[in-house]
Image: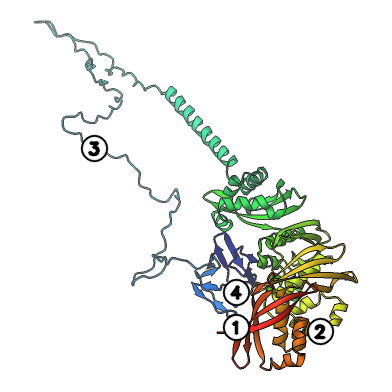
Amino acid sequence: MEAALNGPFGQVTLGATPLTIGGTPDNQLVLADASVSSHHAEIRPQGQDYVLIDLGSANGTFLNERRLDPHAPSLLHAEDTVRIGDTRFTYEVAGVSETEPTVYVGSHQEGEPGYSPTVAAPSTGYGSYQPAAYPPSPPPAAAGSEPFVYPPGAPYPGEPATYYGSDAQSAAYPPPPPPPADSEPAIYPPSAPYYSAPVPAPTQPRKRRGLWIILGAIAAVLVIGLVLFGVIGYVNRSTPTKSLNAFCSALKSGDYQTAYNQLASGLQSKVGSEAQFAAGYASNLGLGKITNCTVTTVNDAAGTGTISTTFASGSTVVDDYTFVNESGTWKINSQQPRSTPTLTLHTYCDAIKRGDHPTAYTQLSSTAQSRESEAQFAANFGSGQLTDCMVSYVNDAAGTGTITYASSSGTKLTADLTLVNESGTWKINSQQPPSTPTFTLHAYCDAIKRGDYPTAYTQLSSTAQSQESEAQFAASFGSGPLTDCVVSYVNDATGTGTITYTFSGGSKIAAEDRLVNEGGTWKLQSEQVRSTPTLTLLIFCSAVKSGNLALAYSQLSSGRQRQQSEAQFASLWTAKVTDCTVSNVDDTAGTGSISFTFANGGSNIRDYTLIDENGTWKIVIGRLRQP
């Protein structure tokens, strides 16, 4: 059974193999629609029929506006409507008519015998009677008017001619002379036989040769005009070649209005308004202005063609086009760029710059996607606040290129990428940024902000890791959730930089970090936190909560420690602290508050006063706030 999908951009014939539908180029039917999943649905043959299957899409597949269950085949019938995203298709089967016939030829209707359709048969010539066609009789003359007069026939030979008109006279023969009175009748000798007077032949009307010559000339002029009109119409007719050349010339000259007018109505609805279309070609994914545009391999009969576009960056992109005839004018129905490493890297970079991480993720190879989920991939760009992304040094033959990321802080990171061709589409397979102190500090800070302490711990040097375990490292950030982590003052030459941590209560601490190069990779060797009342109270809070009372006791001033031993201090914290929060810190005045919550359900708030002892802030006293 021959079947097809008929959509707004043409017809897709169904065959013996499944038809895959989705938003990525590896599908047989690609829909450039944000609501369409990468692999959305497919149509499979089943016996003499076809079935529609939703592949677990995010926004669903609809058959006659009924959403299908994922991975459950649904049988298609003629004239069924299939909707995927914003695109509707009609399932059509060859030989099935949309309208039932009203007259059946050769069949019986209501007991009547069937009749063959009447067919106009050609004349057989001899052996058949064809009634002669006579002109109709003239209508009767109206009252008071002249009757219709047929022209007289020619006189018969031997009959006097009859003429009509005022001068008409009857032609007669003269009578013999009368005999004289009282005389013998004259005896005439026998005479020759009597013949009637000869009648002149009727005069034939003159042929109107001049009129026929004029009419012939007019007819010739009309024929020539019609021929010329047809030739001009043929020469000026719309073709895919002309539409594609007009589109290409308009893009090259920056005439986006003319270029937009070459698009079919369906494609215009997909790309958006004329302004959106112009904005897209103005940016060109960062490839630069179009410097050349060449039309190649157009097939007017099939309605297909190719354009090769060169940009100011030196990159060249080849696009395949299909056409549809709209009211006698050929319009561009679809545009599919041929995949190259250049196009993939620019698409990836443009998506990253716009924060469109799902689109950027689709540019990764299946191997790269298996290494991290889309959420993990997006999280990698969470704290960098990228302001620019630049592609350079692309080698389409080797499948390599370089991307430089720029953040709002002014720092730049450069990564070398390799690509692999997967089923005709180039995908990013690996991205290896050259290690720098800047990159390490940003990776560390981003992981800390996300609470991904294992990743942050891998940024520490072997010496730093030997000083504390991964669990101890993670515990040191348990006093209050971080809301921000900012890297600044990085010196890649000396391997130093500063990290400023911001906590949920608004408290901030700054740390001086020093890095070391281990086997070509920069690692965090040490972090010296600048002592502030905020830092001291955070350490004290975290130590009490974790039960590390020795560390908490070390945050007391020397004078306070002389008044109270470590054992006496520990006896005050027999009730387990389940939570504590630092707030209202004034680093200038050296004051702040901590709210404690205990395992028995109790809670209290203590106000602390601190002093600076040799550059390190220590707790002098803590007073229980009265309710």
Mark 1 vs 2, N-terminal side: 2
Q: CA distance from mark 3 to mark 2?
A: 122 Å
Mark 1 vs 3, N-terminal side: 3
| Camera-nearest label, 1 or 2 | 1
Up-down: is 299 above or below 88? above
Q: Amino acid at mark 1?
A: Arg
Give the quarter of the image for residue 342: bottom right
Mark 4 vs 3, N-terminal side: 4
Q: Which residue is mark 2?
A: 469
Q: Amino acid at mark 4?
A: Ser
| Camera-nearest label, 1 or 3 | 1
Q: Which residue is mark 1?
A: 625
| Camera-nearest label, 4 or 3 | 4
Q: Amino acid at mark 2?
A: Ser
Which residue sits furthest right?
Answer: 519
Q: CA distance from mark 4 to mark 3?
A: 80 Å
Q: Which residue is mark 3?
A: 139
Q: Are marks 3 and 2 in contact (CB under 8 Å)?
A: no
Q: Amino acid at mark 3?
A: Pro
Q: Which residue is mark 4?
A: 57
Q: CA distance from mark 2 to mark 4?
A: 43 Å
**Which color scheme does this rendered protein use?**
rainbow
Question: Is 601 left, or right, of 425 in this rendering?
Answer: left
Q: Secondary structure at mark 2?
A: loop
| Camera-nearest label, 3 or 2 | 2
Q: Residues within 10 Å of mark 2 (few under 14, many from 20)?
A: few
Q: CA distance from mark 1 to mark 2?
A: 37 Å
Residue nearest the viewer, comparing 466 with 235: 466
Question: Is 241 left, or right, of 147 in this rendering?
Answer: right
Q: Quadrant of the C terminus?
A: bottom right
| Camera-nearest label, 4 or 1 | 1
Mark 3 vs 2, N-terminal side: 3
